[in-house]
Image (tube, rainbow, N blue to C red):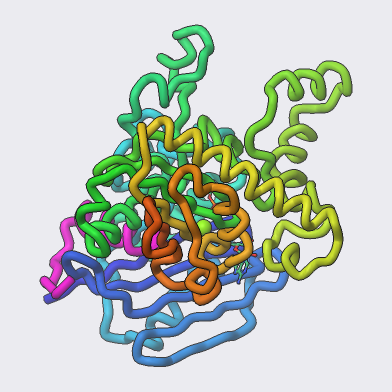
């Protein structure tokens, strides 16, 4: 008999979920949805592959209540199903967690210790695990880490130029969005097996944003670092910044560490530059010159980092856009690729506007693709394997 797995991606105000039937090579999606607005005006929406769409207001407003809501709906939509494992997105695995792990009390405590390294994500990911343990006491809770895909980087890609003991104690560039990159690496093997063995840059441009340089389907370097603040500017995060500026704000402006954290994590990026919104759709719709500046800064930094990662890869064979902005914003993709012909990247404007899978001109030296993100599929695969569930073989 085939087993079923639930995946959870718990954020500060939302829990995204998906239900899969255990199958190889890809788990088969049965239903997905999310609880949004936790802590304010929570609502629930979901749909199954056989219909059954639902959108409703919710009673209760914490993560546990959100999970109860999800479970209740799953019981209505799939009364015959028992969930055999729950897979969770956990953003930071630190030095110790380089592979999916079944969570017990000790693991949970070690992951709690990493909360300061991912304050926007880790506390909520772990709250999701605790809530799921209470709701599914007999199902293994499998933590799947954003950082794991990047472990194994070379010293020069992993270290900061601080005294060596900092590296030894785990002050390293970890990189994030690994569950998304791992999915893209596997999908590319299906789309173009030859390119999948080559040098590929993937641009995960969502609310958080980073680039990953891959060689033969493995991560070689990434723009994110010790925390998910480094690299590209994001919805509300600053990205690359001079550490001397941070010292100046602390010492000269007497800013408190808490205020500095709020500035860098929550008030910067697209939101800070535009003064309008962190949401790319709102910026694209705005005539305000500050909105234009914010988009221009975002795409400029992406171009610079593509250059840097192409150097780390010693060449480039393909570029892939993914996640909310990467998949849907023709304007951002066009801005990123403007003036990149020198590297062999030439956009086909019509294909770009159509959101085709391949958006570079036919004769371009380096093909450019759009591939839809699917972190849930990676989490489900890991949870099925780690929990040892029964799976049915299917065609790819
Ligand atoms: N059609 C679109 N055009 C431009 N930007 C879009 C579009 N759809 C979504 N986005 C942007 O994608 C971003 C969210 O990406 P997403 O991957 O869903 O983020 P996360 O999963 O990190 O919450 C937002 O900035 C949103 O404005
Ligand atoms: C790590 C990270 O930035 O994640 P997200 O894009 O979900 O915010
Ligand atoms: Mg995301």
Q: Nearer the viewer, residue 57 or 165?
A: 165
Quick one: 120 or 355, which is closer to the camera? Answer: 355
For the question of whether residue 143 can be seen, the reply is no
Q: Which residues are magenta?
A: 373-396
Q: Position of residue 82 (x, y in %)?
A: 27, 75
Asked if the stretch drawn in magenta spans residue 377, the answer is: yes
Image position, residue 214 (x, y; %): 34, 42
Image location of residue 194, percent across then percent down: 21, 53
- Residue at (60% x, 56% y) in the render: 207
Horizontal arrangement in the rendering, residue 10 relative to residue 245 (left or right): left
Residue 68 lies in the magenta stretch: no
Note whether 199 is above or below 396 in the view shown. Answer: above
Outermost residue to the bottom: 51
- In depth, the one of 339 and 202 nearer the eye is 339
Residue at (76, 23) in percent of width and height: 245
Indicate whether 209 appears above or below 282: above
The answer to whether residue 273 shows anywhere in this view is: yes
* Residue displayed at 62% across by 77% down: 43
Is 276 in front, or is 321? Answer: 321
């Amino acid at each position: 008999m085939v087993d079923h797995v639930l995946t959870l991606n718990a954020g500060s105000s939302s829990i995204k979920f998906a239900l899969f039937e255990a199958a190889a090579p890809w788990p088969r999606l049965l239903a997905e949805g999310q609880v949004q607005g936790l802590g304010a005006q929570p609502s629930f929406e979901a749909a199954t592959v056989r219909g059954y769409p639902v959108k409703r207001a919710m009673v209760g407003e914490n993560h546990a209540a959100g999970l109860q809501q999800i479970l209740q709906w799953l019981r209505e939509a799939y009364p015959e199903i028992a969930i055999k494992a729950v897979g969770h997105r956990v953003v930071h695995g630190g030095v110790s967690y380089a592979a999916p792990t079944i969570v017990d009390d000790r693991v949970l405590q070690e992951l709690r210790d990493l909360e300061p390294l991912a304050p926007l994500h880790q506390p909520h990911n772990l709250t999701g695990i605790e809530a799921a343990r209470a709701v599914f006491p007999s199902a293994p809770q499998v933590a799947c880490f954003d950082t794991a895909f990047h472990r194994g980087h070379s010293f020069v890609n992993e270290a900061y130029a601080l005294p060596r003991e900092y590296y030894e104690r785990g002050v390293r560039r970890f990189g994030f969005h690994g569950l998304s990159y791992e999915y893209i690496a596997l999908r590319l093997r299906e789309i173009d097996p030859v390119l999948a063995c080559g040098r590929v840059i993937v641009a995960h441009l969502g609310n958080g944003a980073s680039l990953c340089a891959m060689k033969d389907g493995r991560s070689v370097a990434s723009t994110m670092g010790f925390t998910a603040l480094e690299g590209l500017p994001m919805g509300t995060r600053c990205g690359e910044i001079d550490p001397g500026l941070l010292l100046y704000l602390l010492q000269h402006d007497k800013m408190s560490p808490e205020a500095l954290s709020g500035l860098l994590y929550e008030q910067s990026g697209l939101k800070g530059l535009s003064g309008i919104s962190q949401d790319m759709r709102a910026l694209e719709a705005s005539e305000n010159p500050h909105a234009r500046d914010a988009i221009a800064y975002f795409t400029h930094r992406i171009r610079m980092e593509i250059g840097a990662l192409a150097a780390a890869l010693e060449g480039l064979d393909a570029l892939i856009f993914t996640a909310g902005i990467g998949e849907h914003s023709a304007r951002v993709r066009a801005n990123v690729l403007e003036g990149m012909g020198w590297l062999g990247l030439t956009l086909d404007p019509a294909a770009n506007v159509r959101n085709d899978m391949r958006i570079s001109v036919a004769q371009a030296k380096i093909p450019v693709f759009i591939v839809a993100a699917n972190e849930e599929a990676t989490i489900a695969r890991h949870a099925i394997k780690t929990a040892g569930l029964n799976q049915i073989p299917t065609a790819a």
